[in-house]
Image (spheres, grey):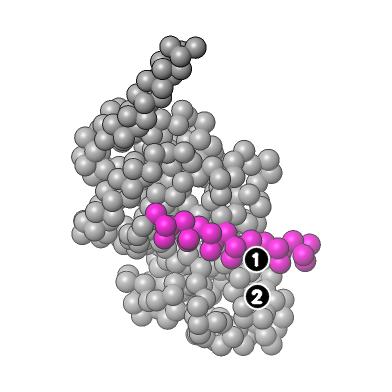
Amino acid sequence: MFHHRKLSCIALAAICAAGPLAAEDWPSAPLHLYVGFPAGSSPDTIARLVAEPLADALGQPVVVENKPGAGGVIGVQQMLADKNDGLSFAVTINGPLTTAQRLVEDLSYDPATDITPVALIATSPLVLGVTSDFPADTVAGFIKQATENPGDIAYGSVGHGSGAHLTAELFANEAGVDLYHIPFQSYAEVTTSIIGHEIDGGFMAPSAAMPHVEAGKMKILGITSSAPFPSLPDVPVMAGQANLPEDFRAELWNGFIAPSGTDPEIVERLNSEIVEILAMPEVADKLLAMGWQVQPGSTEEFATRIADDTALWGAVIDGIEARQ
């Protein structure tokens, strides 16, 4: 009995000793970085911008693998389906971590318990674009029109539960107005309908609106970031206008995540490397040209952002469901 107990203690000591060494020796093989969107999409491009310098820093390839579907959920699911060996990660947008548990039936994971936040990468605001002849040139004027004509202003989004839809609902709730929602399949359809005066406007990525604004076929009334956006310095923020609160903010984001249970030392190493990558001017410039602003920060700050946005959008979804 004593002999077996002694061997067990020796084995346990060996396992404990191996833990730190495993983290120190990491990575000993290529990393897999899953993206729940197709090649050429914003999350894919962002993942590849990070993957190349990350591979140089870690001394191992970082292989981006596209697993599109379900608004990014499939990419997260694929990461979790892989063996949790410190080599499987994902770059994802907000939805799979903040709203999917409310909008996707039979979601196979719980973002709060199955995901480890590693690093927020970049954020992108939305702009409120309207027809070129809309009878208001400011967000305050838009709210005045909506107040005087409840339910008459029609806006488009890229589908129920999309970032554009939830942002418009948040805006309407905070401003105390009633807007009419029309879902479309793509931003192209939304902008075409705005230009064709089939709808009045919509919340969209700046990159979707700007070509039409420059052509004089659309105008932008405001932006949903909490501060002026670097590439659109003359577009006023919505926060504080008319009935909107001073802390009004609605942003899309991309972040780097890991399965829960990933060695904390690996998570911290990845966060440190990603923060350094985001400080590279060439990376920040490329992201800004795409409409994204780098947001380097700690794992704790990213976790707080996920929790805050989950609560924010959960309340918006509750309001939508209550009206149905």
Residue 116 lies, in percent from the top left, at 46, 46
Label 1 to label 2, Cα distance in Å?
Answer: 8 Å
Could you tell me what secondary structure mostly forms the magenta stretch? helix
Name the N-terminal-most of marks 1 and 2. 2
- The verdict on residue 136 being magenta is no
Q: Is residue 136 visible?
A: no
Residue 99 lies, in percent from the top left, at 60, 54
Segment colored magenta: 299-324
Judge by depth and name the residue closer to the eye, 185 or 98.
98
Q: Give the labeled residue for mark 2.
A: 173
Neighbor class of circle 1 (other Cα within 10 Å; few <14, some 14-19, many 20+) is some
In the picture, the disc for residue 303 is none
Instruction: Look at 29% across and 55% down and name the residue there.
Output: 275
Q: Are marks 1 and 2 in contact (CB under 8 Å)?
A: yes
State the image quarter where residue 319 is shown: bottom right
Q: Give the labeled residue for mark 1.
A: 316
Residue 220 lies, in percent from the top left, at 46, 76
Quarter occupied by the C terminus: bottom right
Task: Give left or right: position of 33 versus 1.
Answer: left
Task: Give left or right: position of 261 versus 322.
Answer: left
Neighbor class of circle 2 (other Cα within 10 Å; few <14, some 14-19, many 20+) is some
Above or below residue 278? Residue 138 is below
Above or below residue 60? Residue 101 is below
Q: Amino acid at mark 1?
A: Val
Task: Give left or right: position of 305 versus 270.
Answer: right
Instruction: Look at 36% across and 80% down and name the residue there.
Output: 234
Residue 308 lies, in percent from the top left, at 53, 63
Instruction: Look at 65% across and 46% down and name the residue there.
Output: 104
Tell me the element at label 1.
Answer: helix
Instruction: Look at 44% across and 67% down and name the residue there.
Output: 125
